[in-house]
Each structure stands twice: as structure tokens, then as C-alpha cells.
Image: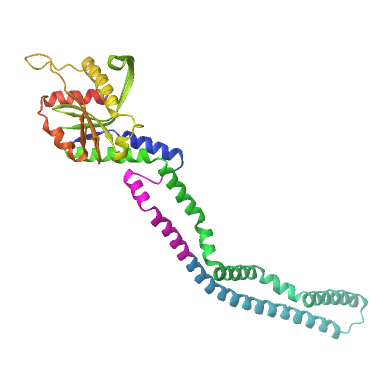
């Protein structure tokens, strides 16, 4: 299997774009593609799950309501018995004081005070019996009322309830979908570059792929062909092999995009990268092991189109479909030794 280094550039850009907008649920481009394909299914699943949860809640509420009504009745009975027993007990004590004849003034006074408080308590319990019983079942009565309201609303407005409960999840799902729709170009680029990496992985260990290869120059390189200075270059994939180096740019374009005048041709970009890379290699790597003299490191320009490619042929660059990629790469004979190959790889990875 080919050696792979680095992360796909468009994937890094896509991840950064999504994280900036708060979308963190995806770990790969494949997951994004599945989400977009199954968006409507996932939305339906949210509705169905919400409906199932609501149905379950309704059934449980009906059962719990019966239990709460039974519990309330028991509490009322217990509290009623407690109050009645308390009233009876107080009246017994009152009768006892009435029956106790005592001529002693002090004892009579004390008995009168006791009798007053006993009668006060009796009157309190008799007068407030209903309120006291209501207080004992206040919390459970509140819960029963809430359950009854829920059951009534469920029966009358079930579909509306489902929509209300699913609303936040549906809105979140739609937000993610809209973010992805606005990132279609990055997604297409990531998918294309990912397919290229998968294809190149099928090659042997004699090949090394550096994804999102970048070079910056402290002193800009003058590019005479286009009368410009190059400060840096970025290459989708840099493939190093014994046959030389392949600069690979990936385009996941439709037929209409290929023919569109608004999209910039990738050929100028890849030629620019080739020139800058040639200057860098010339200054930093010398292959003088051959007895004839210093060896050249071949650099080939390659644009990989995932599904569609132009019919025209162009100078300085080969354009291949994804399915043609590996056969094209393997066509070239090796000109570098294992030692030279590893030296180039190590230098480019620094």
C-alpha cells in the first residue's frame, strides 16, 4: 500500500467551515454524503420517534392517572380518619373535664382554661376539616390535573403536539442541511480528493503521497512566463515515486462546470506549482550518484477528474479520469533508486 502523509486540504477547509458554524456531528466526508442523501428520511425519523415517545407518554400517563386517583382517595380517607379521631379525642377530654366536679377554686380555674383550649381545638378541626384534607392532597391533585390536561390535549391536538415537540430537532437538522448546501463546492472537492487518496492507496509501498502539500518562499520566485512572483504554492496531492514526482490537482466537476467560462482553468495553477517545485528541488536536492552526472527529477503535471473530463488535449499537463489514474502512474519506468526516493520524500515532508 502506498504511504500517505497529511490531511486532504479541502477536508481541512470543510471541517473548519463547519466548526465555525457549529456543525460538529460529522467525522468524514462519507458521513456528510450519507446525511445529504438521507436528509428527508432523518427528518421523518424525528417525527416518527417523537410520535412514538408521545404515544408511550400518553399510555403511561393514563396508567399513572388511575394510580394517582386511587392514591388521592386513600390519602383523603386516612386524613379524614385522622381528623375525626382527633376531634373525638378532644371531645372526650372535654366531657371528662365537665364530669369532674371540683370545689377547689384554683383547680376549677385550671379546668376552665383547659376546657377553653380543648373547645378551641375542636372548633378549629371541625371548621377547617375540608381545608386540611385538601392541603393533604394538594400536590397529588395538581399532578392529576396536569395529567388530565395532557390526556385531553393529546386526544384533541395530537399532530400539533408532535410538531411542537419535534420542532427544535427539525430546525437543528434543517440548519445543518442548509450549512452543507452552502458548502457544496467544498464537499465535492473533499469527496473527489478522498477518492484520489483511496485510489493511490492501492499502489505499492514504492509510492508516497503528500496531501495538501504547501511551500512558502522567504524570497519570492519570479515566474517569467506570467510575469509574477510566487510567494507560496499549495498542491492537492504530491505523489513521489521512483519514476519521479506527480503534481496532482483533483477536480470533481460536472460536465456543465467543465464547459463554464466562469470557472478558472486549473492548468495555469498546476504549471505555476510545477515551476516553483522545480526551483525548490534544484536548490535543495542534488542527485549525483550516477556516473554520467547529476540526475534530473522528473515532475509531471496531472489533473484528475472524478467523473467527467474535457475532450481536448492540453500542453504540459495530462488530464485523467479517476479510473485511469493508477494505470497512468504505473506506466512510467523507475529512474530513481530506493535511497534517492526516500531522500526526496524526507526533504519534501520537512
The N terminus, quarter of image = top left
Q: Is residue 126 above or below residue 191?
A: below
What is the x, y in percent for residue 15? 38, 38
In this image, 335 relative to 141: left or right? left
Q: Is residue 303 left or right of residue 334?
A: right
User: Is 131 or 96 nearer to us in this picture?
Assistant: 131
Which residue is located at x 20 percent, y 37 percent? 200
For the point 50% across and 71% down, which residue is it? Answer: 59
Does 305 sit above or below residue 213? below
Magenta span includes 31: yes
Residue 211 quadrant: top left
Q: Taking 132 as reference, is 175 left or right?
A: left
Between 224 and 13, the residue placed more toward the observer is: 224
**Furthest-left residue in view?**
291
Q: Main secondary structure of the magenta part?
A: helix
Q: Residue at x 62, y 75 (%)?
A: 72
Q: In front here: 331 or 335?
A: 331
Range of residues picked out in magenta: 24-53
* Rendered residue at 30%/29% (across/down): 265
Q: Is residue 198 left or right of residue 47?
A: left
Q: Position of residue 30 (x, y in %)?
A: 31, 46
- Residue 183 position, x and y percent, is 40, 40
Amino acid at each position: 500500500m502506498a504511504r500517505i502523509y497529511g490531511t486532504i486540504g479541502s477536508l481541512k477547509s470543510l471541517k473548519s467551515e463547519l466548526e465555525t458554524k457549529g456543525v460538529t456531528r460529522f467525522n468524514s466526508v462519507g458521513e456528510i454524503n450519507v446525511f445529504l442523501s438521507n436528509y428527508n428520511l432523518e427528518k421523518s425519523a424525528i417525527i416518527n420517534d417523537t410520535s412514538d415517545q408521545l404515544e408511550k407518554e400518553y399510555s403511561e400517563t393514563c396508567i399513572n392517572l388511575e394510580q394517582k386517583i386511587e392514591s388521592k382517595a386513600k390519602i383523603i380517607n386516612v386524613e379524614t380518619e385522622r381528623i375525626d379521631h382527633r376531634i373525638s379525642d378532644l371531645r372526650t377530654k372535654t366531657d371528662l373535664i365537665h364530669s369532674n366536679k371540683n370545689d377547689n377554686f384554683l383547680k376549677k380555674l385550671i379546668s376552665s382554661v383547659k376546657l377553653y383550649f380543648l373547645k378551641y381545638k375542636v372548633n378549629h378541626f371541625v371548621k377547617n376539616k375540608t381545608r386540611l384534607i385538601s392541603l393533604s392532597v394538594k400536590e397529588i391533585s395538581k399532578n392529576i390535573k396536569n395529567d388530565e390536561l395532557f390526556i385531553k390535549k393529546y386526544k384533541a391536538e395530537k399532530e400539533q403536539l408532535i410538531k411542537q415537540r419535534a420542532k427544535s430537532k427539525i430546525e437543528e437538522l434543517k440548519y445543518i442541511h442548509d450549512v452543507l448546501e452552502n458548502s457544496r463546492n467544498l464537499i465535492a472537492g473533499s469527496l473527489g480528493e478522498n477518492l484520489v487518496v483511496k485510489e493511490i492507496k492501492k499502489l505499492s509501498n514504492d509510492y508516497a503521497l503528500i496531501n495538501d502539500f504547501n511551500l512558502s518562499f522567504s524570497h519570492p520566485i519570479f515566474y517569467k512566463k506570467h510575469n509574477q512572483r510566487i510567494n507560496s504554492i499549495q498542491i492537492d496531492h504530491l505523489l513521489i515515486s521512483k519514476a519521479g514526482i506527480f503534481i496532482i490537482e483533483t477536480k470533481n466537476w460536472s460536465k456543465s462546470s467543465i464547459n463554464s467560462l466562469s470557472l478558472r482553468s486549473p492548468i495555469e495553477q498546476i504549471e505555476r506549482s510545477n515551476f516553483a517545485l522545480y526551483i525548490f528541488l534544484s536548490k535543495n536536492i542534488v542527485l549525483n550518484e550516477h556516473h554520467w552526472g547529476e540526475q534530473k527529477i522528473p515532475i509531471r503535471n496531472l489533473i484528475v477528474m472524478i467523473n467527467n473530463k474535457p475532450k481536448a488535449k492540453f500542453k504540459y499537463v495530462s488530464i485523467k479520469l479517476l479510473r485511469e489514474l493508477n494505470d497512468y502512474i504505473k506506466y512510467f519506468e523507475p529512474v530513481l533508486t530506493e535511497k534517492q526516493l526516500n531522500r526526496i520524500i524526507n526533504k519534501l515532508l520537512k
